[in-house]
Amino acid sequence: MRPFAYARAHSADDAVAALAQNPGAAFLAGGTNIVDLIKIDVAMPGMLVDIGALPLAAIDVAPDGTVRIGALARMSDTADHAAVRSGAPAVSMALNLSASAQLRNMATIGGNVLQRTRCVYFRDVTQPCNKRAPGTGCSAIGGDDRKMAILGANALCIAVNPSDFSVAMLITDATIHLRGPAGERTTPFLGFQRLPDDPARDTNIGPGELITAVSFVPSSLTRNSTYLKVRDRASYEFALVSVAAALDVQGGTIRNARVALGGVAHAPWRALIAEASLIGKPAAIATYAAAADAELRAAKPQRLNGFKIPLARNAMIRALATVGGAA
Amino acid sequence: MSPEIRTNVISARLTRRRFLLRAVLPAVATGIAVGTPRLSAMARAVTSVTVIPASGPGAVAVTLNVNGADHALEIEPRVTLLDALRERLALTGTKKGCDQGQCGACTVLVDGRRVNACLTLAIATEGKKVTTVEGLAHDGRLHAVQAAFIEYDAFQCGYCTPGQICSAVGLIAEGRTRSDAEIREYMSGNICRCGAYTNIVAAIKVAAGHA
């Protein structure tokens, strides 16, 4: 591992100042992603600014019902928090289906949102990769593309985002809270993680910015949500395809819907076409199948991952049936 | 600014192993550009800018609390908890398997919670209590999980066993032992290439008081 300096921040302002003024520095929270990436020379920070001591680990419920998850809340603590479990079961499920118990005890919510792709070529510094070394090309295109994207990819990058939590947060219309050199700001979760027009940029986070929290407002929709994860082994594995689904069904008719997909694109994929297709229709398998087909009409397989299209279709149908019933 | 000038500015303000972040440098650089030589005065002038002291990348003093005892070490910030335990403290019970968070052989408890020591920086555990497999037995008596692993033959080669045992101690504290399926799911972070899983589940059930 390459050497780096280490500084411990005691306030968010300290942390933000340290990072903004040290272009080669990176934040250290749980460490499960950055330490791994340093070991394999994908990340080479000159300094780690340890934010672990900042008071950003709380999960609070505001009087208006908003659930605010501090950026340093552990994945395990977030998954098991009553307000998260009842307010958006999909979020709790997605967290508990992520990684391992050890990693969930370390990894934080802010870090989860910012974690980098598991693309094998991104992680192999001997290979060209537009995300790691812009302009060198994409080794995954024409290579081992079995786990790569089927939606929203381009000729620059076909990697997928590995976060389960982010997929589930998309069905809650969540907000991301940031603090940076210019002060605080909030931004919708949807769109924060980017498609690969500029593959080096995973998200719209600014230089020196720190995620301080994510928040969502529970509703009848989010309370009736689920998360389905399909992978090569039954546990401790990233998704080939995952689905977060939430339905508001009244009298057998779908009044509102949220669907998001993981493992299929450079960013967690909000299935807006499927949602539009579901609303106003009877809660039935044929409705779910039509919605899945509509969403996946734009899907483009790579050489080895054509299986992801029917897999995503079937996973969407099953997840929707779980929350909407299967008439 | 040349590295030499930067070093001089820094050493004027702080001890050799601690240096100001570059918060001070834009102001100092401006001073050089207009030919003002009073670097120390300017360094004082910008101390209101928030700066935090950094250490390393060379070896720094770090105190680790492991199995109830403090250990004063001189280690670089890049040293993982796993390497500090094995290479500096000779606590080789904690194993290095994949060294990238994918096998669980390095599982230890930090403040009572199971973590992967290979992805934990030792310096970041200052002020926390680390427990390794060597710290589980007390007064010559094995921990209940250790005893159960022996009784139920929950290993073959034994390489993953310290990690399995520490993970199981954490699992039981989390209360995730209500069924075989739950034990298997919440122990999935510990890979056993010998395939001793059946006996591992049996041992954990006994240690948790469910069998």
Image: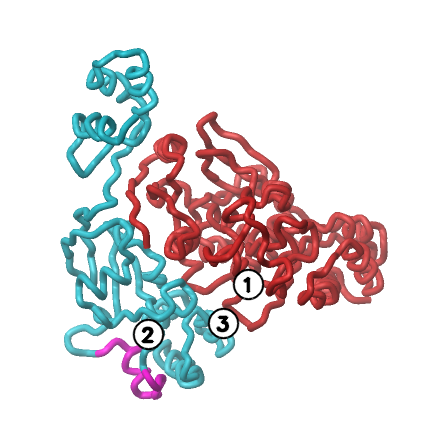
Chain colours: A red, B cyan
Where residue B207 sits: x, y (%)?
34, 78
- From the viewer's perspective, is residue A99 above or below residue A191? below
Residue depth check, mark 1 versus mark 3: number of the one nearer the observer: 1
- From the viewer's perspective, is residue A181 above or below residue B98? above
Provide the residue designation for mark 1: A238
What amino acid is labelled 3 in the image?
A: Glu
Where residue A136 sits: x, y (%)?
55, 48
- On the picture, is B124 further left or further right than A310? left
Q: Which chain's residue wears label 2?
A: B
- Residue that appears at 53% across and 66% down: A237
Quadrant housing the C terminus of chain A: bottom right
Q: Which chain's residue wears label 1?
A: A
Residue A101, picture quadrant:
bottom left
Q: Which of marks 3 and 2 is nearer the N terminus?
A: 2
SS at mark 1?
loop
SS at mark 3?
helix
What crowding class fits label 1: few (fewer than 14 Cα within 10 Å), some (14-19), or many (20 or more)? many
What whole-number distance in Å separates the C-alpha atoms at marks 3 and 2? 16 Å
What whole-number distance in Å separates the C-alpha atoms at marks 1 and 3? 15 Å
- From the viewer's perspective, is residue B100 above or below residue A281? below
Do the residues indicated by labels 3 and 2 lie within the same chain of the protein? Answer: yes
- Front residue (pair A156, A253): A156
- On the picture, is B199 further left or further right than A266? left
Q: Give the range drawn in magenta.
A: B142-157
Residue A135, picture quadrant:
top right
Provide the residue designation for mark 3: B185
What amino acid is labelled 1 in the image?
A: Phe
- Residue that appears at 56% across and 72% down: A234
Please state the total of marks drawn on the protein image.
Answer: 3
